[in-house]
Image: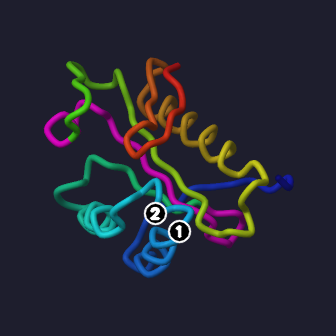
Amino acid sequence: MENNELTFRPVSDTDIDLLTSWLNKDYIIKWYDDPEAWLAEISGRDDAYSWIHHFIVMDGNTPIGFCQYYDCFDANCIEGWYSVSQRNDTFSIDYLVGDESYLGKGYGKAIVKLLTEKVWQTHQTSRSLNTARRGFAFCSC
């Protein structure tokens, strides 16, 4: 990975075409199996899914990926594989590197580190993060 600083910006409606292309790439679709479901969540980010925090990952002015996080307490009703009994205890993160020229260069690790720091700073928690929602295995910190 080059010594560029990654940043996050909130997803906007102008990102939907880019997200659609990323979510339909073969190397991404095997983990994010239903692009339409993901796009529905993203499109509902101001309404039904406002509890999910969606971001475009930027390398300078270049969008290179997508990430999101949420408090698992808020997802209890839709996630059938876990149960969380209190807020600010367990968070889930998801990410992808959509720009293929950034693959295999450490950007995924950098996204996870930056997103983890964001969750911990925003919610004053250091309890648990989970990325197993869509087939990833990561950590419980």
Its colouring scheme is: rainbow
Depth order, front residue of 24/56 = 24
Mark identifier at residue 103: none
Q: How far across and down, in percent of the image, does residue 81 sit?
A: 25, 31
Q: Residue at x 51, y 31 (%)?
A: 121
Task: Judge the density around disc 1: few (<14), some (14-19), many (≥20) Cα neighbours within 10 Å.
Answer: few
Q: Quadrant of residue 57?
A: bottom right
Instruction: Report the residue marked by disc 2.
Output: 29
Camera-side residue of 67 and 119 = 67
Where residue 85 sits in the image (x, y, percent)?
A: 20, 19
For residue 90, side relative to residue 110 (left or right): left
Alpha-carbon span between mark 1 and mark 2:
5 Å
80 displayed left or right of 90: left
Circle 1: residue type: Asp
Residue drawn 79% across and 53% down? Answer: 105
Q: Secondary structure at mark 2?
A: helix
Q: Kindly identify the amino acid type of the residue bearing the numbered disc 2.
A: Ile
Q: Is residue 65 magenta?
A: yes
Q: x, y (%) of residue 36?
A: 30, 69
Q: Residue furthest right?
A: 2
Q: Report the span colored magenta.
A: 58-78
Against 109, residue 126 (above or below) is: above
In the rendered view, would you say 67 is above or below 40?
above
Side of 40 where 8 appears, left or right: right
Q: Residues within 10 Å of mark 2 (few under 14, many from 20)?
A: few
Pinpoint residue 77: horizontal percent, then vertical percent. Answer: 14, 38
Residue at horizontal 43 percent and vertical 75 percent from the top: 20
Which disc is residue 26 wearing?
1
